[in-house]
Amino acid sequence: MQAIYKLQPQEINEDFIRALRSTFEHNTHVKITITVETDEDETDETNYLLGTKANKERLLANINSDKRITFTEEAFDTFVRENLGP
C-alpha cells in the first residue's frame, strides 16, 4: 500500500500521527519518506510539461476547451448508483 499526504508543516501533529497509525495498523513495517517541495519544483514540472511545442499546444487546447458536463443533484445521484453501485 502506498499513500501520499501533501500538507503544511503545522499539520504534522498528534492527530495526524494517530491517523497514520490507524491507516497502517495492520502492516508490520511502514517506511516514511519526507520530501520538501519548493515553488521551484512546481515551476520545473510546468516547464517540463510545456517543454515541447506539441505538448504545449495540446495542454493549452485542453485548458481552453469548454468540455463540461452539468448534472442536477438527482441526475448525479442516479449516475453514481448506475455506475458505481449503492
Image (cartoon, grey):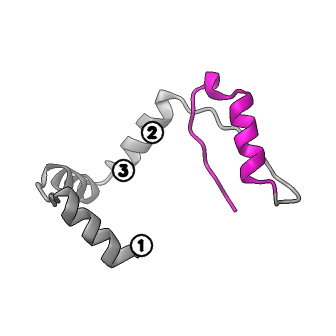
Name the residue type under label 2: Asp
Label 3 and label 2: CA atoms lie apart by: 9 Å
Looking at the image, is 65 positioned above or below residue 77? above
Label 1 packing within 10 angstroms: few (<14), some (14-19), many (20+)? few
Residue 26 percent location from the top left of the image: 82, 60
Residue at numbered disc 2: 44
Q: Residue furthest top?
A: 10
First in sequence: mark 1 vs mark 3: 3
Are the residues flagged by discs 1 and 2 in contact, CB closer than 8 Å?
no
Name the residue type under label 3: Leu
Which residue is drawn at the image coordinates 48% and 30% (left, top)? 40
Q: Quadrant of the N terminus?
A: bottom right
In the image, taking residue 80 as reference, residue 11 lies left or right, namely right
Asked whether 22 falls inside the magenta stretch, the response is yes
Residue 3 percent location from the top left of the image: 64, 53
Q: Residue furthest left?
A: 66
Residue 43 percent location from the top left of the image: 41, 35
Residue at numbered disc 3: 49
Label 2 packing within 10 angstroms: few (<14), some (14-19), many (20+)? few
Name the residue type under label 1: Pro
**Range of residues picked out in magenta:** 1-25
Q: How many marks?
A: 3
Q: Secondary structure at mark 2?
A: helix
Q: Secondary structure at mark 3?
A: helix
Residue at numbered disc 1: 86
Q: Quadrant of the C terminus?
A: bottom left
